[in-house]
Image: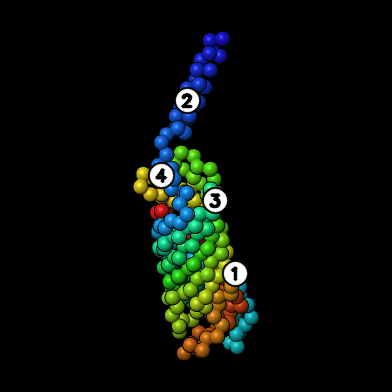
Amino acid sequence: MKRFIIILCIFNLAITSVWAQLRKPQNQPYADLKRYHLGFHVGVHAQDLILTNVGIPTSDGEIWFGEIPSYSPGFSVGIIGSLYINQYLDLRLTPTVHFGDRKVTFKEQNTKEIFETSLRSNYLSFPLDLKYTAVRLNNYRPYVIGGVFTSFDMGRKKGNPLLLKGLDYGVEFGFGCDIYLPFFKLCPEIKFCFGLADVLEKDRSDISNDNDRKYTQALSKATSRMIVLTFNFE
């Protein structure tokens, strides 16, 4: 009986402690009820390309294969515009600029010769997402997000051995958590972006060295991927 009373007391103290945490005053209790609200975000990202190799010999008998062996971190910054739909759903437009690059390595099958080139890009992206948010627990509210995007590459440099098209589009999804602070919301968020368009530029009339055409000819398709970690301030 004594043990039962002790366990009951401990259980009661635990319940009281949890209830006290839940009853803490909430920061910005009406922040999510605004029809419109704005914000900005900063973060880092990693760009990738899915390369489809042809595997056909050139006129010189060479067979080149391209890949991206490693990722380079880039910087992202943008603004947030959010439209309240209901207590769980928001429609968000988040124009963002992604500064980064991708290092592509080509390897010749027989001689093992290696050629490397860097694709620098400044993407102006326009994602349109639906944000589904869970029930708020004190000053925390997790959410998932998904939608579509269109992006324009403002950093293309013609004359490179490999060139990507200036327009891309695709789908994205991710998750995050709204953290309610006294004067604003801080929202760590991670998103995965998958391009649906073939962004490989096959018309290379801009190349002055004909020998560089073999790197474009070694590929039949290239699609983009990107992982983005941002910190939203709303």
The residue beneath circle 4 is 28
Badge number at residue 16: 2
Seen from this angle, which residue lies furthest front? Answer: 35
- Residue visible at 49% across and 45% down in the picture: 141
1 or 2: tag closer to the N-terminus: 2
Above or below residue 24? Residue 79 is: below
Residue 106: % across, % down: 53, 75
Q: How far apart are marks 4 and 2 (CA)?
A: 25 Å
Residue 15: % across, % down: 50, 26
The residue beneath circle 3 is 86
Q: Mark 1, residues whose alpha carbon is within 10 Å: few (<14), some, or many (≥20)?
A: some
Question: Disc 3 marks which amino acid?
Answer: Asn
1 or 3: tag closer to the N-terminus: 3
Residue 75 visible in the picture: yes
- Residue visible at 54% across and 45% down in the picture: 134
Q: How far apart are marks 1 and 4 (CA)?
A: 39 Å
Q: In which quarter of the image is residue 198?
A: bottom right
Q: What element carries label 4?
A: loop
Q: Which of 44 and 209 is in front in this view?
A: 44
Above or below residue 141? Residue 90 is: below
- Residue visible at 47% across and 49% down in the picture: 33
Q: Which of 8 and 45 is in front in this view?
A: 8
Q: Is mark 3 on a helix, strand or loop?
A: loop
3 or 4: tag closer to the N-terminus: 4
Q: Mark 3, residues whose alpha carbon is within 10 Å: few (<14), some, or many (≥20)?
A: few
Front label number (2 vs 3):
3
Front label number (1 vs 2):
2
Above or below residue 158? Residue 97 is: above
Badge number at residue 196: 1
Question: Disc 4 marks which amino acid?
Answer: Gln
